[in-house]
Image (spheres, rainbow, N blue to C red):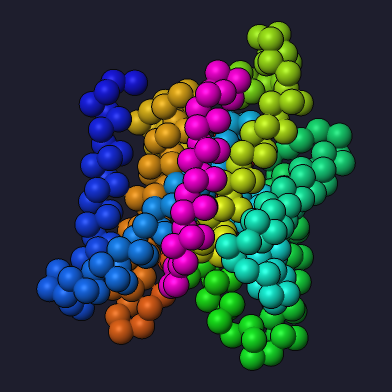
Amino acid sequence: MERNKFLIFPAVLAAACLFSLAAGPAGWSDYDIILNLRLPRTLAALAVGAGLGLAGALFQGVLKNPLSDPYILGTSSGATAAAVFCFLSGIERTSPVFFAAVFAGAFGATFLSYWLARLAGRLSDAALVLAGVAVSAFLSALVMLTLTSAGARSFSLFYFVLGGLYSVQPAVLIISSVIIAVSGGVAMARWRALDAMALGSENAYHLGINPDRERILFFTLACAATSAAVAIGGTIGFVGLMTPHIVRRITGPSARALVPAAALGGAAMLAAADAAGRSFFSPSEIPAGVVMALAGAPFFMWLLWKTSRGKN
């Protein structure tokens, strides 16, 4: 990819950051609001968006499925369910136990969806989507049942489940950002293996790649990035679905350019979505997860139609 094409992504990211920092009735006039309220939310949106964009690119590459996304596969729901249970159990958000539990929830839900889709004997796009939707729906219902039973203690968690970037602890933001950065770094170090996986397991094997080992590695990296994103912002969907498809038109299919571009694009997309939710709907504030669902659901339907049409 030409270098000047890749410069599009930092430029878009910078524009999204400026929009996020300026979004609100006070504009640029109140620097206390900018530094103490908008800047932490912008940083949180950047980290969450980068993690979800990265995870989406990895899932789509290793599964060869254009409909793959942490939200659709149930990865985000598994991480959210684990996070909610940790909150209600009194486990601190900065505790290693919290991050381990959230990762386990994301990893378990992803492999459950993958296993259910493989029961038919052949992993198809439709089977994977249906399995992911089923796992996600069950976990979401379990979370809502738990929150309803918890009573007054659970009110503040509803905004977390909806994907709101309201109050983020600096320690959580730092830990999650490190996890996302490490996951992205390892993925970039294995970009050739990811490109080989996109050619199919048999072709990857002939190229000297162990498909089973690489699949577990990339699943682990995608789940780690997703769980880190969920630890900050709860359930936010469609970033990992939309971003790789959009940036792929500029970068091409190679993971060497696609993976970092998807992370940058996801960061810009979520920063803009969060800013839109607190400015376009003023004086009300719409969680970023809801804004992404409003934009992502039509995109998913269009992509589903396009995918099915291409196979007919």
Q: How many marks?
A: 0
Q: Is residue 140 left or right of residue 46?
A: right
Q: In this view, does 46 lie to the left or right of 188?
A: left
Determine whether 162 is above or below 238 in the image: below
Residue at the (38%, 28%) spot, across then down:
251
Q: Is residue 91 left or right of residue 13?
A: right
Q: Which of 246 and 103 is in front in this view?
A: 103
Residue at the (82%, 46%) spot, across then down:
116
The quadrant holding residue 309 is: top right
Instruction: Tell me the quadrant of the picture where the N terminus can be found.
Output: top left
- Would you say residue 141 is visible in this rendering? no
Determine whether 165 is above or below 54 in the image: below
Q: Main secondary structure of the magenta part?
A: helix
Q: Give the residues drawn in magenta, as a range.
A: 165-194
Image coords of residue 110 (percent x, y): 72, 48
Determine whether 188 is above or below 52 in the image: above
- Would you say residue 160 is visible in this rendering? yes
Reply yes or no: does residue 192 show up in magenta.
yes
Instruction: Tell me the quadrant of the picture where the C terminus can be found.
Output: top right
Q: Nearer the viewer, residue 146 or 57?
A: 146
Q: In this view, does 9 lie to the left or right of 179?
A: left
Image coords of residue 291 (percent x, y): 43, 66
The quadrant holding residue 261 is: top left
Residue at the (86%, 39%) spot, across then down:
120
Image coords of residue 172 (percent x, y): 51, 60
